Image: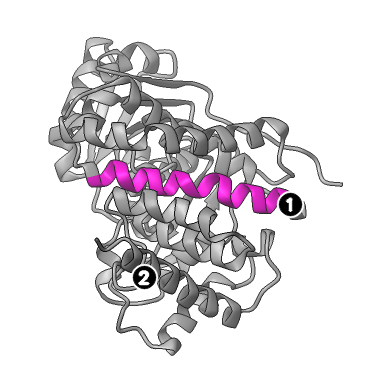
Protein backbone atom coordinates (compact mmCIF):
# COMPACT_ATOMS: atom_id res chain seq x y z
CA UNK A 1 0.00 0.00 0.00
CA UNK A 2 1.51 3.34 -1.08
CA UNK A 3 1.75 6.38 1.16
CA UNK A 4 -0.94 9.03 0.98
CA UNK A 5 0.54 12.35 -0.11
CA UNK A 6 -1.03 15.81 -0.25
CA UNK A 7 0.81 18.90 -1.47
CA UNK A 8 -0.21 22.53 -1.92
CA UNK A 9 1.15 26.08 -2.31
CA UNK A 10 2.28 27.83 0.87
CA UNK A 11 -0.17 30.73 0.44
CA UNK A 12 -3.09 31.39 -1.91
CA UNK A 13 -4.59 34.89 -2.20
CA UNK A 14 -7.67 35.65 -4.34
CA UNK A 15 -9.90 38.69 -4.60
CA UNK A 16 -10.85 41.89 -6.38
CA UNK A 17 -7.78 44.17 -6.69
CA UNK A 18 -5.64 41.60 -4.86
CA UNK A 19 -2.67 42.59 -7.01
CA UNK A 20 -2.49 45.92 -5.13
CA UNK A 21 -1.30 44.03 -2.06
CA UNK A 22 1.28 41.80 -3.75
CA UNK A 23 4.22 43.81 -2.45
CA UNK A 24 3.18 43.15 1.14
CA UNK A 25 3.26 39.41 0.52
CA UNK A 26 6.45 39.32 -1.57
CA UNK A 27 8.51 41.35 0.90
CA UNK A 28 8.34 38.41 3.31
CA UNK A 29 10.13 36.29 0.67
CA UNK A 30 12.90 38.53 -0.62
CA UNK A 31 13.92 41.88 -2.10
CA UNK A 32 15.52 40.89 -5.43
CA UNK A 33 12.99 39.62 -7.98
CA UNK A 34 12.57 38.87 -11.63
CA UNK A 35 9.13 39.46 -13.16
CA UNK A 36 8.25 37.40 -16.24
CA UNK A 37 5.34 38.27 -18.53
CA UNK A 38 4.55 38.27 -22.25
CA UNK A 39 4.05 41.44 -24.28
CA UNK A 40 0.27 41.56 -23.77
CA UNK A 41 0.34 40.77 -20.06
CA UNK A 42 2.92 43.44 -19.31
CA UNK A 43 0.24 46.01 -20.14
CA UNK A 44 -2.54 44.11 -18.35
CA UNK A 45 -0.78 43.40 -15.07
CA UNK A 46 3.00 43.18 -15.32
CA UNK A 47 3.74 46.88 -14.88
CA UNK A 48 1.26 47.06 -11.99
CA UNK A 49 3.08 44.21 -10.24
CA UNK A 50 6.42 45.97 -10.62
CA UNK A 51 4.94 49.23 -9.32
CA UNK A 52 3.56 47.52 -6.21
CA UNK A 53 6.94 45.86 -5.60
CA UNK A 54 8.74 49.21 -5.84
CA UNK A 55 6.44 50.67 -3.20
CA UNK A 56 7.84 48.03 -0.83
CA UNK A 57 11.45 48.74 -1.94
CA UNK A 58 11.63 45.46 -3.83
CA UNK A 59 13.83 45.39 -6.94
CA UNK A 60 12.38 43.84 -10.10
CA UNK A 61 14.27 42.63 -13.17
CA UNK A 62 11.72 42.76 -16.02
CA UNK A 63 11.81 39.93 -18.58
CA UNK A 64 9.67 39.51 -21.71
CA UNK A 65 8.39 35.95 -22.09
CA UNK A 66 8.69 34.67 -25.66
CA UNK A 67 5.62 32.42 -25.59
CA UNK A 68 6.81 28.84 -25.19
CA UNK A 69 7.58 26.89 -22.01
CA UNK A 70 10.62 25.26 -23.58
CA UNK A 71 14.06 24.33 -22.31
CA UNK A 72 15.53 27.11 -24.45
CA UNK A 73 13.30 29.76 -22.88
CA UNK A 74 13.88 28.43 -19.37
CA UNK A 75 17.65 28.57 -19.86
CA UNK A 76 17.50 32.09 -21.30
CA UNK A 77 15.54 33.54 -18.40
CA UNK A 78 17.55 31.58 -15.82
CA UNK A 79 20.72 33.22 -17.16
CA UNK A 80 19.12 36.65 -16.70
CA UNK A 81 17.95 35.79 -13.18
CA UNK A 82 21.38 34.53 -12.15
CA UNK A 83 23.09 37.68 -13.42
CA UNK A 84 20.66 39.78 -11.35
CA UNK A 85 21.19 37.64 -8.21
CA UNK A 86 17.46 37.00 -8.05
CA UNK A 87 15.96 35.19 -5.04
CA UNK A 88 12.26 35.51 -5.99
CA UNK A 89 10.85 34.56 -9.39
CA UNK A 90 7.45 36.06 -10.27
CA UNK A 91 5.46 34.76 -13.21
CA UNK A 92 2.57 36.90 -14.45
CA UNK A 93 0.17 35.63 -17.09
CA UNK A 94 -1.07 32.34 -18.51
CA UNK A 95 -0.10 28.71 -18.06
CA UNK A 96 3.09 28.62 -20.13
CA UNK A 97 4.45 31.79 -18.54
CA UNK A 98 3.72 30.42 -15.09
CA UNK A 99 5.25 27.02 -15.88
CA UNK A 100 8.39 28.76 -17.13
CA UNK A 101 8.57 30.87 -13.96
CA UNK A 102 8.42 27.72 -11.83
CA UNK A 103 11.24 26.16 -13.81
CA UNK A 104 13.41 29.27 -13.54
CA UNK A 105 12.78 29.45 -9.80
CA UNK A 106 13.84 25.83 -9.50
CA UNK A 107 17.02 26.53 -11.44
CA UNK A 108 18.02 29.46 -9.19
CA UNK A 109 16.71 27.76 -6.03
CA UNK A 110 14.49 30.74 -5.30
CA UNK A 111 11.00 31.50 -4.06
CA UNK A 112 8.17 31.13 -6.57
CA UNK A 113 5.38 33.67 -6.93
CA UNK A 114 2.58 33.00 -9.39
CA UNK A 115 0.20 35.72 -10.63
CA UNK A 116 -2.39 34.31 -13.07
CA UNK A 117 -4.19 36.86 -15.24
CA UNK A 118 -6.90 34.41 -16.27
CA UNK A 119 -8.59 31.46 -14.61
CA UNK A 120 -7.96 29.33 -17.70
CA UNK A 121 -5.96 26.43 -16.22
CA UNK A 122 -5.14 24.77 -12.90
CA UNK A 123 -1.39 25.22 -13.42
CA UNK A 124 -0.82 28.06 -10.90
CA UNK A 125 -0.81 26.03 -7.67
CA UNK A 126 1.10 22.95 -8.80
CA UNK A 127 4.67 21.78 -8.23
CA UNK A 128 5.18 20.86 -11.86
CA UNK A 129 5.55 22.38 -15.30
CA UNK A 130 4.51 21.08 -18.68
CA UNK A 131 7.52 21.45 -20.96
CA UNK A 132 7.20 21.79 -24.73
CA UNK A 133 9.64 21.95 -27.61
CA UNK A 134 10.37 25.33 -29.19
CA UNK A 135 7.68 24.43 -31.75
CA UNK A 136 5.03 23.66 -29.12
CA UNK A 137 5.17 19.86 -29.08
CA UNK A 138 4.64 18.27 -25.63
CA UNK A 139 7.91 16.86 -24.27
CA UNK A 140 7.08 15.96 -20.68
CA UNK A 141 6.44 17.05 -17.12
CA UNK A 142 9.04 18.68 -14.91
CA UNK A 143 8.48 18.12 -11.18
CA UNK A 144 9.70 20.31 -8.32
CA UNK A 145 10.49 19.74 -4.67
CA UNK A 146 7.87 22.28 -3.58
CA UNK A 147 4.74 24.05 -4.75
CA UNK A 148 4.73 27.82 -5.34
CA UNK A 149 5.36 29.91 -2.25
CA UNK A 150 2.67 32.42 -3.16
CA UNK A 151 -0.24 32.51 -5.63
CA UNK A 152 -2.04 35.83 -6.11
CA UNK A 153 -5.06 36.00 -8.42
CA UNK A 154 -6.87 39.29 -8.94
CA UNK A 155 -10.48 38.57 -9.90
CA UNK A 156 -10.91 42.06 -11.38
CA UNK A 157 -8.23 41.16 -13.94
CA UNK A 158 -9.85 37.77 -14.54
CA UNK A 159 -13.23 39.46 -15.10
CA UNK A 160 -11.64 41.65 -17.77
CA UNK A 161 -10.26 38.73 -19.76
CA UNK A 162 -12.14 37.18 -22.72
CA UNK A 163 -14.91 34.76 -21.57
CA UNK A 164 -13.26 32.02 -23.64
CA UNK A 165 -10.43 31.84 -21.10
CA UNK A 166 -12.79 31.29 -18.18
CA UNK A 167 -14.66 28.62 -20.16
CA UNK A 168 -11.33 26.92 -20.89
CA UNK A 169 -10.52 26.91 -17.19
CA UNK A 170 -13.90 25.38 -16.42
CA UNK A 171 -13.19 22.62 -18.94
CA UNK A 172 -9.77 21.96 -17.44
CA UNK A 173 -11.26 21.90 -13.94
CA UNK A 174 -14.13 19.65 -15.01
CA UNK A 175 -11.58 16.94 -15.78
CA UNK A 176 -10.37 17.02 -12.16
CA UNK A 177 -12.95 14.74 -10.55
CA UNK A 178 -13.41 12.63 -13.70
CA UNK A 179 -9.71 11.76 -13.63
CA UNK A 180 -9.23 11.61 -9.86
CA UNK A 181 -12.11 9.19 -9.30
CA UNK A 182 -10.72 6.83 -11.95
CA UNK A 183 -7.31 6.88 -10.27
CA UNK A 184 -8.87 6.32 -6.83
CA UNK A 185 -10.91 3.40 -8.17
CA UNK A 186 -7.84 1.41 -9.22
CA UNK A 187 -5.46 2.71 -6.55
CA UNK A 188 -3.19 4.51 -8.99
CA UNK A 189 -0.57 7.08 -8.03
CA UNK A 190 -1.14 10.83 -8.13
CA UNK A 191 1.11 13.57 -9.49
CA UNK A 192 2.26 14.08 -5.88
CA UNK A 193 3.79 10.60 -5.93
CA UNK A 194 1.52 8.62 -3.60
CA UNK A 195 -2.10 7.57 -3.33
CA UNK A 196 -5.02 9.97 -2.97
CA UNK A 197 -5.83 11.46 0.42
CA UNK A 198 -9.36 11.90 1.72
CA UNK A 199 -8.72 15.65 1.54
CA UNK A 200 -7.79 15.54 -2.15
CA UNK A 201 -10.82 13.43 -2.97
CA UNK A 202 -13.12 15.86 -1.16
CA UNK A 203 -11.54 18.83 -2.95
CA UNK A 204 -11.87 17.20 -6.38
CA UNK A 205 -15.52 16.37 -5.76
CA UNK A 206 -16.25 19.88 -4.48
CA UNK A 207 -14.54 21.28 -7.55
CA UNK A 208 -16.98 19.55 -9.89
CA UNK A 209 -19.98 20.40 -7.72
CA UNK A 210 -19.01 24.10 -7.79
CA UNK A 211 -18.55 24.08 -11.56
CA UNK A 212 -22.00 22.69 -12.27
CA UNK A 213 -23.55 25.16 -9.81
CA UNK A 214 -21.91 28.42 -10.84
CA UNK A 215 -20.26 28.02 -14.27
CA UNK A 216 -23.01 29.75 -16.24
CA UNK A 217 -23.34 32.67 -13.82
CA UNK A 218 -19.58 33.18 -13.75
CA UNK A 219 -19.38 33.02 -17.55
CA UNK A 220 -22.06 35.68 -17.87
CA UNK A 221 -20.31 37.76 -15.20
CA UNK A 222 -17.14 37.85 -17.30
CA UNK A 223 -19.17 38.90 -20.34
CA UNK A 224 -20.22 41.89 -18.23
CA UNK A 225 -16.63 42.29 -16.91
CA UNK A 226 -18.10 42.07 -13.41
CA UNK A 227 -16.73 40.45 -10.26
CA UNK A 228 -19.55 38.50 -8.61
CA UNK A 229 -19.76 35.80 -5.92
CA UNK A 230 -20.34 33.27 -8.72
CA UNK A 231 -17.16 34.36 -10.48
CA UNK A 232 -15.18 34.21 -7.24
CA UNK A 233 -16.41 30.63 -6.73
CA UNK A 234 -15.48 29.55 -10.26
CA UNK A 235 -12.06 31.23 -10.12
CA UNK A 236 -11.35 29.29 -6.94
CA UNK A 237 -12.66 26.06 -8.50
CA UNK A 238 -10.63 26.55 -11.70
CA UNK A 239 -7.46 27.51 -9.89
CA UNK A 240 -7.22 26.23 -6.32
CA UNK A 241 -9.68 23.32 -6.13
CA UNK A 242 -8.72 21.95 -9.52
CA UNK A 243 -5.03 22.52 -8.87
CA UNK A 244 -5.05 20.65 -5.56
CA UNK A 245 -7.50 18.08 -6.89
CA UNK A 246 -5.52 17.09 -9.96
CA UNK A 247 -2.12 17.10 -8.31
CA UNK A 248 -2.99 15.21 -5.13
CA UNK A 249 -6.00 13.42 -6.63
CA UNK A 250 -4.53 12.09 -9.86
CA UNK A 251 -4.53 12.58 -13.63
CA UNK A 252 -5.67 9.90 -16.06
CA UNK A 253 -6.84 9.78 -19.69
CA UNK A 254 -8.22 13.29 -20.31
CA UNK A 255 -4.87 15.04 -19.94
CA UNK A 256 -2.94 12.24 -21.63
CA UNK A 257 -5.16 12.65 -24.69
CA UNK A 258 -4.61 16.41 -24.56
CA UNK A 259 -0.88 15.73 -24.65
CA UNK A 260 -1.42 13.34 -27.53
CA UNK A 261 -3.00 16.09 -29.61
CA UNK A 262 0.33 17.93 -29.68
CA UNK A 263 1.64 15.18 -31.97
CA UNK A 264 -0.53 16.56 -34.79
CA UNK A 265 -0.05 19.65 -36.92
CA UNK A 266 -2.75 22.08 -37.95
CA UNK A 267 -5.45 24.28 -36.50
CA UNK A 268 -5.83 22.18 -33.34
CA UNK A 269 -2.87 24.12 -31.96
CA UNK A 270 -5.03 27.24 -31.96
CA UNK A 271 -7.25 25.58 -29.35
CA UNK A 272 -6.59 26.37 -25.69
CA UNK A 273 -5.38 23.81 -23.16
CA UNK A 274 -8.83 23.59 -21.59
CA UNK A 275 -10.60 23.22 -24.92
CA UNK A 276 -8.48 20.20 -25.79
CA UNK A 277 -8.95 18.80 -22.28
CA UNK A 278 -12.75 19.13 -22.74
CA UNK A 279 -12.66 16.71 -25.66
CA UNK A 280 -10.16 14.52 -23.81
CA UNK A 281 -12.59 14.30 -20.89
CA UNK A 282 -15.34 13.07 -23.20
CA UNK A 283 -12.93 10.47 -24.54
CA UNK A 284 -12.19 9.29 -21.00
CA UNK A 285 -15.92 9.04 -20.29
CA UNK A 286 -16.24 6.96 -23.48
CA UNK A 287 -13.50 4.64 -22.18
CA UNK A 288 -15.53 4.10 -19.01
CA UNK A 289 -18.99 2.69 -18.39
CA UNK A 290 -21.46 5.56 -18.03
CA UNK A 291 -25.10 6.11 -18.85
CA UNK A 292 -26.13 8.46 -21.62
CA UNK A 293 -27.53 10.86 -18.99
CA UNK A 294 -24.14 11.05 -17.26
CA UNK A 295 -22.20 11.71 -20.45
CA UNK A 296 -24.73 14.23 -21.75
CA UNK A 297 -24.52 16.11 -18.45
CA UNK A 298 -20.95 17.05 -19.37
CA UNK A 299 -21.73 17.69 -23.03
CA UNK A 300 -24.58 20.03 -22.06
CA UNK A 301 -22.29 22.19 -19.93
CA UNK A 302 -19.53 22.23 -22.54
CA UNK A 303 -21.89 23.23 -25.35
CA UNK A 304 -23.51 25.97 -23.25
CA UNK A 305 -20.05 27.52 -22.73
CA UNK A 306 -19.03 27.27 -26.37
CA UNK A 307 -16.51 24.51 -25.70
CA UNK A 308 -15.58 21.87 -28.31
CA UNK A 309 -17.24 18.46 -28.11
CA UNK A 310 -16.68 16.96 -31.58
CA UNK A 311 -13.69 16.30 -33.80
CA UNK A 312 -14.98 19.03 -36.09
CA UNK A 313 -15.00 21.46 -33.17
CA UNK A 314 -11.28 20.84 -32.57
CA UNK A 315 -10.50 21.02 -36.30
CA UNK A 316 -9.88 17.30 -36.71
CA UNK A 317 -12.93 16.34 -38.75
CA UNK A 318 -10.66 15.49 -41.70
CA UNK A 319 -8.19 13.52 -39.58
CA UNK A 320 -7.63 9.92 -40.69
CA UNK A 321 -7.53 6.95 -38.36
CA UNK A 322 -3.76 6.98 -38.82
CA UNK A 323 -3.69 10.59 -37.62
CA UNK A 324 -5.76 9.73 -34.57
CA UNK A 325 -3.53 6.73 -33.95
CA UNK A 326 -0.62 9.15 -33.58
CA UNK A 327 -2.62 10.95 -30.89
CA UNK A 328 -3.47 7.66 -29.18
CA UNK A 329 0.10 6.35 -29.32
CA UNK A 330 1.40 9.59 -27.78
CA UNK A 331 -1.32 9.40 -25.10
CA UNK A 332 -0.34 5.85 -24.17
CA UNK A 333 3.44 6.16 -24.16
CA UNK A 334 5.24 4.83 -21.11
CA UNK A 335 4.90 7.18 -18.17
CA UNK A 336 1.75 8.92 -19.41
CA UNK A 337 -0.98 9.53 -16.84
CA UNK A 338 -3.52 7.34 -18.67
CA UNK A 339 -1.77 4.29 -17.19
CA UNK A 340 -2.68 5.38 -13.64
CA UNK A 341 -6.29 4.37 -14.29
CA UNK A 342 -6.48 2.30 -17.48
CA UNK A 343 -4.93 -0.83 -18.95
CA UNK A 344 -5.64 -0.15 -22.60
CA UNK A 345 -4.03 0.04 -26.03
CA UNK A 346 -3.72 2.91 -28.46
CA UNK A 347 -6.35 1.20 -30.61
CA UNK A 348 -8.78 1.35 -27.68
CA UNK A 349 -8.14 5.09 -27.38
CA UNK A 350 -8.84 5.67 -31.08
CA UNK A 351 -12.15 3.83 -30.74
CA UNK A 352 -13.02 6.00 -27.76
CA UNK A 353 -12.15 9.16 -29.72
CA UNK A 354 -14.56 8.16 -32.48
CA UNK A 355 -17.20 7.18 -29.92
CA UNK A 356 -16.93 10.47 -28.02
CA UNK A 357 -17.25 12.36 -31.29
CA UNK A 358 -20.35 10.36 -32.24
CA UNK A 359 -21.95 10.83 -28.80
CA UNK A 360 -21.54 14.60 -29.13
CA UNK A 361 -22.79 14.66 -32.73
CA UNK A 362 -25.89 12.72 -31.66
CA UNK A 363 -26.43 15.15 -28.78
CA UNK A 364 -26.19 18.16 -31.11
CA UNK A 365 -28.61 16.57 -33.59
CA UNK A 366 -31.08 15.78 -30.81
CA UNK A 367 -30.96 19.37 -29.53
CA UNK A 368 -30.74 21.09 -32.92
CA UNK A 369 -34.13 22.68 -32.50
Range of magenta residues: 164-185
The part of the image, by quadrant, that contains residue 206 is top right
Give the left or right position of residue 35, taking residue 202 as reference: left
The residues bearing labels 1 and 2 have C-alpha atoms spaced at a distance of 30 Å
Disc number placed over residue 284 in the picture, else none: none
* Residue ID for mark 2: 361
Q: Nearer the viewer, residue 245 or 123?
A: 245
Question: Is residue 35 visible from the viewing direction of this image?
Answer: no
Q: Nearer the viewer, residue 367 or 55?
A: 367
Asked if the magenta segment contains residue 66, the reply would be no
Q: Residue at x 46, y 51 (%)?
A: 297
Q: Position of residue 83 (x, y in %)?
A: 33, 38
Q: Earlier in the sequence, mark 1 or mark 2?
A: 1
Label 2 environment density (alpha carbons within 10 Å; few <14, some 14–19, many ≥20): some
Q: Residue at x 12, y 34 (%)?
A: 43
For the C terminus, give its image quadrant: bottom left
Question: Is residue 119 visible from the viewing direction of this image?
Answer: yes
Q: Position of residue 202 (x, y in %)?
A: 63, 32
Q: Position of residue 256 (x, y in %)?
A: 52, 63
Q: Position of residue 350 (x, y in %)?
A: 51, 79
Label 1 environment density (alpha carbons within 10 Å; few <14, some 14–19, many ≥20): few
Labels in figure, total: 2
* Residue ID for mark 1: 185
Of badges 1 and 2, nearer the viewer stands 2
Amino acid sequence: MSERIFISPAKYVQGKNAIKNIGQYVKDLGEQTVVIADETVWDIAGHDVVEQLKQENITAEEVLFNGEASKTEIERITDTANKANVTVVIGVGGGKTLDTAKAVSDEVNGYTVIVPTTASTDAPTSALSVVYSDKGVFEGYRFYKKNPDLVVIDTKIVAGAPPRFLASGIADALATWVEARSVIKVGGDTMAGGSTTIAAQAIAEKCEETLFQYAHLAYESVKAKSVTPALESIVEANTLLSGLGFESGGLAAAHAIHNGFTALKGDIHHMTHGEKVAFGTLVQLALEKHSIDEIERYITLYVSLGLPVTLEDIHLNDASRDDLMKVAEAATTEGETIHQAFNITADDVVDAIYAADQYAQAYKKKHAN
